[in-house]
Image: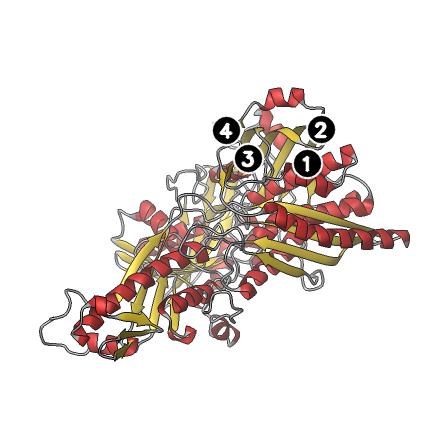
């Protein structure tokens, strides 16, 4: 059995030996390079764009301005600012030239005359709706109310109430590889090479925009140097590049610089929560009321992130009464979209902060407060009707508590030495396996090897190894005989991609079902070759056996015989039967859960140093503990960045001050730390492969534990992500 084993990643050798092919490695004959002229002001009315001088440069083949496509949820000026500039970094014009450097040089020869408009930057000012972020429409682009029980009355009945304002700053996804792409022109059929998490999403969006100009668009996913959610949906540049290829009838390549990526790759988080909690003297929470404001930037497609956060605001706690008022506000900033966790880290920061605040107000142990509110019996519906599926929350919390008590004791000893050290714990529940479904094809090749085609689009998680493990077990064959391929809309017709910690669970289950169907097909083939009834045969360890006659056929023998002859009569089957496909989706989300425990010191210089760290997760069946632990390690370092370092900052005029790694700090090897990870397997799903996702758990559970440890170290309440130097003084 391979499932449950620490199998080394099948993908690594190709990448480590320099044979990966990222999108910037793709070069096509006679391609033109596309460079984007971006806005340097946050809000303005365009009066005139003059690009005549750029066309005079030798090697410049064309300029595009004013391209507008009506796509739902995107800014009115999409993918290019035509009459109104909405944020710094918004595309205004595009140059096509014979090489990259000439294309970028030609941008300097384009002049834009504009009338600057007041920029909307502050959320409170945006809510007043006096100055417009987008001319002709309200700044309040989205409003929704979620209510369960009677929170107002429950608040009145509570022994105590507390109010706290929690601020979660914008962050930049900061993948190692900036975004880029190549469009191969073949008349009315295009091939798009993309750094993406979903080739099928990109194909769908591009066909909606250009369907009257092309017969089909194939999307091929190159190797991806990190994505974290930010490369799920196509950006303006993809639309501009396709338009350029169709207009100039040539292949087109583009690649962002790092500065361009900071300005144009959609930001994340950006929420403010004004929370009021009612609770009794025994620590039981009666009601939560949250006024949630999300900074959407210049596009409103990111409002769903607030919905996710809102409906999880009670977390893993049995709180019967809750109300969340959501407002999505337009500002003159880069649009907002998903990033690792997508709404769930925001929710966890809220519910874990108010649990710690209650503990402090009552002078009660924070773990005891959590135990008194923890959901006991599963499945359970939260106040908004979200159904948590399975698990044993208390058992996991009690394991984490043992570590926390040790960290707490060590912190106390170090504080006696005059050092500022604190211990913090968080408990989280995660909604994942976002649907609707995923697909897979399992194919027996003529050489006896098995090829698995998945619709998921991994970007470094090791998903292919996990898929290979479950298929190898299902077919009873060697892991070395299973190859997993993905990332091409020509390989599999319908799929969704990688997001929401869904790849191994949804695509894995689809692969299991497809493998089972393939086994049935193989048995049918073997029955014909052996001249036996299917019922007489058994399948074991990659072989079909007839116990009565002692006949044995291997998968290779069956495949060779099924594909051997060009002529003859098909006596044994109506179809080749050498492949099978399946799709799989849950009828509900799955809900893994876990706990993070941190021991942290704030030095005399104000630096944050992690002394020790522990995490424990229950994700159902763990297919590959090494892959899972890698996700937790990476996510925990990322959560440290969000808690302590990373913040996108705009000045009062709407100009971003963080335009690269010189101004935007991300954790490096210097800031990383050792940690211990454990797992439980009690919260299994009801799927053939009863696993749940692990890709985002650490970014959900990490920040609240880190903030609590810092709070105990400095002795004052902390209410924002990230903390700043002045907070730790």
Q: Disc 4, disc 3: CB below 8 Å?
A: yes
> Which quarter of the figure has residue 198?
bottom left
Count neighbours of disc 1 (C-alpha within 10 A) and say few if under 14, some if 14 to 19, many if 20 or more: many
Residue 7 position within the rendered picture, expressed as x and y whole percent measured from the top left: 51, 70
Residue behind mark 2: 162
Residue 94 position within the rendered picture, expressed as x and y whole percent measured from the top left: 44, 52
**What residue do we see at 44% from left, 44% from top?**
80
Count neighbours of disc 3 (C-alpha within 10 A) and say few if under 14, some if 14 to 19, many if 20 or more: many
Q: CA distance from mark 4 to mark 3?
A: 10 Å
Q: Disc 2, disc 1: CB below 8 Å?
A: yes
Residue behind mark 1: 354
Q: Earlier in the sequence, mark 4 or mark 3?
A: 4
Report how many numbered discs are placed on residues in the image.
4
Q: Looking at this view, is 669 or 277 the one in front?
A: 277
Q: Looking at this view, is 33 or 405 the one in front?
A: 405
Instruction: Confirm whether residue 473 shows in the render.
Output: yes
Q: Earlier in the sequence, mark 2 or mark 1?
A: 2
Query: Quick one: SS at disc 1?
Result: helix
Q: Earlier in the sequence, mark 1 or mark 3?
A: 3
């Amino acid at each position: 059995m391979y499932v449950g084993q620490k199998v080394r990643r099948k993908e690594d050798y190709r990448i480590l030996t320099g044979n990966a092919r990222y999108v910037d490695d793709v070069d096509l004959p006679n391609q033109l390079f596309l460079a984007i002229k971006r806005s340097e002001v946050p809000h303005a009315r365009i009066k005139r764009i003059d690009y005549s001088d750029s066309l005079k440069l030798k090697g410049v083949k064309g300029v595009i301005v004013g391209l507008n496509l009506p796509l739902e949820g995107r800014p009115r000026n999409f993918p290019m600012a035509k009459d109104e500039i909405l944020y710094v970094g918004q595309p205004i014009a595009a140059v096509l030239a014979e090489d990259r450097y000439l294309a970028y040089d030609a941008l300097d020869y384009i002049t834009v005359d504009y009338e600057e408009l007041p920029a909307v930057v502050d959320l409170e000012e945006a809510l007043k709706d006096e100055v417009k972020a987008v001319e002709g429409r309200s700044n309040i682009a989205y409003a929704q109310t979620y209510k369960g029980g009677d929170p107002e009355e429950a608040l009145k009945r509570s022994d105590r109430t507390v109010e706290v304002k929690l601020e979660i700053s914008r962050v930049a996804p900061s993948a190692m590889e900036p975004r880029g792409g190549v469009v191969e022109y073949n008349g009315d059929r295009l091939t798009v090479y993309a750094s993406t998490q979903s080739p099928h999403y990109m194909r769908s969006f591009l066909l909606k925009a250009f369907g009257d100009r092309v017969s089909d668009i194939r999307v091929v996913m190159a190797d991806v140097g990190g994505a974290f959610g930010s490369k799920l949906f196509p950006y303006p540049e993809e639309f501009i590049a396709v338009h350029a290829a169709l207009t100039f009838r040539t292949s087109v390549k583009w690649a962002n610089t790092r500065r361009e990526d900071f300005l144009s790759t959609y930001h994340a988080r950006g929420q403010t929560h004004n929370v009021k909690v009612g609770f009794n003297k025994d620590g039981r929470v009666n009601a939560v009321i949250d006024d949630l404001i999300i900074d959407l930037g210049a596009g409103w497609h990111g409002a769903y992130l607030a919905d996710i956060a809102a409906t999880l605001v009670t977390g893993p706690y049995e709180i019967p009464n809750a109300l969340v008022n959501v407002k999505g506000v337009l500002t003159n900033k880069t649009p907002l979209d998903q990033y690792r966790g997508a709404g769930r880290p925001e929710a966890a920061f809220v519910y874990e902060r108010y649990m710690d605040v209650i503990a402090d107000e009552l002078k009660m142990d924070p773990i005891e407060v959590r135990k008194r509110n923890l959901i006991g019996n599963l499945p359970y519906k939260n106040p908004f009707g979200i159904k948590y599926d399975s698990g044993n929350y208390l058992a996991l919390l009690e394991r984490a508590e043992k570590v926390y008590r040790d960290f707490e004791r060590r912190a106390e000893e170090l504080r006696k030495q005059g050092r500022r050290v604190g211990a913090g714990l968080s408990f989280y529940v995660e909604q994942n396996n976002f649907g609707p479904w995923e697909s897979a094809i399992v194919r027996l090749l003529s050489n006896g090897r098995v090829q698995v085609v998945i619709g998921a689009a991994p970007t470094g998680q090791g998903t292919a190894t996990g898929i290979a493990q479950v298929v190898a077990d299902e077919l009873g064959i060697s892991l070395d005989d299973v190859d997993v391929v993905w990332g091409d809309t020509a390989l599999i017709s319908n799929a969704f991609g990688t997001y929401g910690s869904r790849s191994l669970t949804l695509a894995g289950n689809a692969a299991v079902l497809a493998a089972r169907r393939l086994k049935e097909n193989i048995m049918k083939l073997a029955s014909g070759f052996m001249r036996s009834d299917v019922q007489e045969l058994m399948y074991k360890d990659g072989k079909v056996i007839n116990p009565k006659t002692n006949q044995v056929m291997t998968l290779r023998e069956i495949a060779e015989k099924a594909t051997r002859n060009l002529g003859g009569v098909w006596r044994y089957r109506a179809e080749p039967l050498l492949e099978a496909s399946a799709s799989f989706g849950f009828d509900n989300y799955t809900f893994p859960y876990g706990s993070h425990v941190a021991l942290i010191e704030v030095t005399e210089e104000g630096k944050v140093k992690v002394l020790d760290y522990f995490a424990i997760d229950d994700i159902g069946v763990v297919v590959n503990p090494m892959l899972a632990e890698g996700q937790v390690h990476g996510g925990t370092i990322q959560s440290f960045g969000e808690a302590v370092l990373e913040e996108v900052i705009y000045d009062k005029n709407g100009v971003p001050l963080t335009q690269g790694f010189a101004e935007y700090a991300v954790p490096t090897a210097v800031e990383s730390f050792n940690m211990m990870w454990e797992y439980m397997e009690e919260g299994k799903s009801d799927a053939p492969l009863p696993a749940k996702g692990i890709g985002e758990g650490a970014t959900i559970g990490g920040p609240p534990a880190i903030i609590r440890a810092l709070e105990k170290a400095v002795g004052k309440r902390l209410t924002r992500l990230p903390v700043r130097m002045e907070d730790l003084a």
